[in-house]
Amino acid sequence: MEFVNPEGLRLDGRRPMEMRQLRAEIGAVARADGSAVFEMGNTKVIAAVYGPREVQNKSQQSNDQALVRCEYTMANFSTGDRKRKPKGDRRSTEISLVIRQTMEACILTHLMPRSQIDIYVQVLQADGGTRSACINAATLALADAGIPMRDLVTSCSSGYLNSTPLLDLNYLEDSAGGPDVTVGFLPKLDRVTLLQMDAKLPVDIVENVMQLAIEGCKAIATYIREVLLENTKQLEYRRGL
Amino acid sequence: MVGLSLGEKHFIKGGIDQNIRSDGRKRDYYRPIFVETGVIPQANGSARVRMGATEVIASVKAELGKPSALHPDKGKVAIFVDCSAVAEPTFEGRGGEELSAELSVALERCLLGGTSGTGAGIDLTSLIVAEGKICWDLYIDSLVISSDGNLLDALGASIKAALANTAIPKVNISAAASADEQPEVDISDEEFLQFDTSAVPVIITLTQVGRHYIVDATSEEESHMSSAVSISVNRKGHICGLTKRGGEGLDPSVVSDMISVAQHLSELLMSRLDSEISAAEAEIGDDEES
C-alpha cells in the first residue's frame, strides 16, 4: 500500500515532515489539581493530576521524595471497534509505566517528600500517537497543578514508510508494519528522556528518524509554552492584575 | 474528597432549609447545562454534557447482530458507564467499578423498560432490520470525566443528546433469501436514518437533605443526603423508572410528593435539554456548511 504518493503527500494529505494539528486546553476537570486536554489530529486525550497529597499506601511512602503514580486508560469508544476492557490489559499497563517513568524523571520529586502525585490519563479518541499525546497532556496538567518540574516533557512519534521518514504517524500509518519511533524530549535541557522503537529499521536511518521526532518534540514544546503563557494571561486577567 | 466540618454541614443544611443553597440556587434549580454533540466522530452518535462541574461524555455505536429468540422483533441496547480516574482518584483501578455498575443498571432501568422490552423509552422495534435474523445492537458507552454530584441526571441527559445525534446507516437486504438462510446485507455509507428520540425520558434526581429535597445536588450536598430518589419522566409526563438510594426510609406520602415535583421539573428540564440539543446540532450543521 502506498503511504507516500508520488507527489509526496501522505494518506491524510500531509507532507512527510508535517505534524498533525495540535490543540490544547488547560483546566478541563474542575475538581483536579491540574488538568488538560491535548489533541494531535484525531487523537484526543485528557489528563488530570491530583497532588501533591498524602500517600494513600503508607508502605510505598518515601522519606526523601514524592511518589509518582500514573494510570492510562482508553475509553470504550476511543477506537474504531468497541473496546470491551478499558483498564488492566497489558498495553495499558505498559504505557502507564512508560508515562510514569518519563514524568518522574522531570518532576523535582525531592522537593515533596512523603507525598504522592497521581497522573490519570484517559484516551477519548485514538488515532495513533496516543502515547505521545498522553505525555504532552500530562506535562500541561502538571504545569496547571503547579508541580515543580525540571523542564517540559514533550513527545512525538515518527516512522519510516516507502523509504521516507514520516513525522507524527496516525493509526493507519502506525499499523502499516513499518517502524514506529516514540521520543520523549526535554527541550531546554536538550535531552532525550524516552526512546522506544518497534519493527526493523536500517542502522543508518535510525539517526535520521529519531532526529525528525526530536524536531517534532521541539515544535510541540513551542506550542505548549504558548498555551501556558496564554493561560497565565487569562488567570492574571481574571484576578484583575 | 476532603471531609466537611460540623459547621459546614450545618451551613449547608440550614441553607437548604431557607431555600438558598451554597451556590445561590433555590431548591428546584438546575445548574447551567451545556450540551455539545458529535464529539466522537467515529461513533454513530455522541454528546458531551456539562452540569456545573459534572461532565460526562456518551457515545452510541451501532453494530449488526442477531435478535434474541424471545423477542425476534426487537433490537438490543446495552448501556455501560465507566467512571474515569480523571474524575476522582478513588476511581483508579477497580475503585470505580461499583459506582459504574450501579449507574449502568439505574440507566438501563430508566431507559429500557422491563425484561420483555415493553415500555422502553427507546423504541427497540425501530432497530430491527430483518425480523428474527438481523437487528441493530446499540452500545451506549458513557464516560464520567468530572464528578461534582448528580451523575445520574447528567448521564441521562448525555444519552438523550447522544441518541438525538445518532445516525444509523440504511441497510439494504438482498431479497432472495430463504427462511433459514442469513440474508446478505449491504450497509449504506451514504444514507442515514436519524434516531427518533421523542420518547426518550429524562432523569430527575431528588436528594433529601434534612426535611427538604433538592434537585441537582453537588457532591458536597450529596455527601449528607438521607436518601435520594431518581425518577425518569418522558415527554408525556409518564414515569418510566424509579430508583431510590440511601439508607433512610421515606414516608410514602413524601415519595408521592417527590414524584409530582419530578414530573413538574421534568417539563422544564426536557425543554431546556431540547433547546440545548437542537442548538448543538445546528452548530454542527453550520460547521459542515461553512
Image (cartoon, coloured by chain):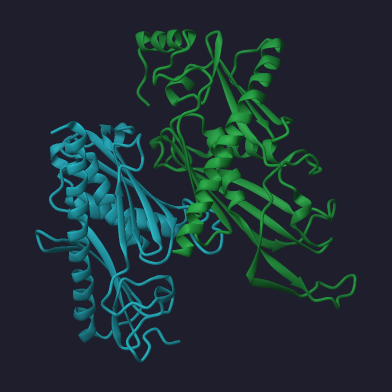
Looking at the picture, how far across and down is residue A102, in whole percent?
A: 24, 55
Chain B as rendered: colour = green
Give the camera-side residue of A114 and B32: B32
Vertical side of B251 occupied by A187: above or below: below
In the image, what residue occupies the spot 52% across and 49% down?
B47
In the image, what residue occupies the spot 57% across and 46% down?
B161
One can see residue B102 in this view: no
Question: Relative to residue B284, is residue A184 drawn left or right?
Answer: left
Question: Relative to residue B99, is residue B167 drawn left or right?
Answer: right
Vertical side of B148 occupied by B65: above or below: below
In the image, what residue occupies the spot 30% across and 80% down?
A15
Looking at the picture, how far across and down is residue B179, in whole percent?
A: 90, 70
Q: Quadrant of the C terminus of chain A?
A: top left
Picture quarter containing residue B4?
A: top left
Give the camera-side residue of B89 and A37: A37
Picture quarter containing residue B90?
A: top left
Looking at the picture, how far across and down is residue A45, in whole percent?
A: 38, 54
Vertical side of B174 occupied by A102: above or below: above
Give the camera-side residue of A112 and B231: B231
One can see residue A112 in this view: yes
Question: Relative to residue B153, is residue A131 drawn left or right?
Answer: left
Vertical side of A20 occupied by A153: above or below: above
> Which residue is outermost to the right?
B179
Chain A as rendered: colour = cyan
In the image, what residue occupies the spot 37% across and 61% down?
A130
Count of numbered marks: 0
Question: Relative to residue A203, is residue A241 drawn left or right?
Answer: left
Q: Quadrant of the N terminus of chain A?
A: bottom left
> Which residue is outermost to the bottom?
A6
Looking at the picture, how far across and down is residue B195, in whole percent?
A: 67, 54
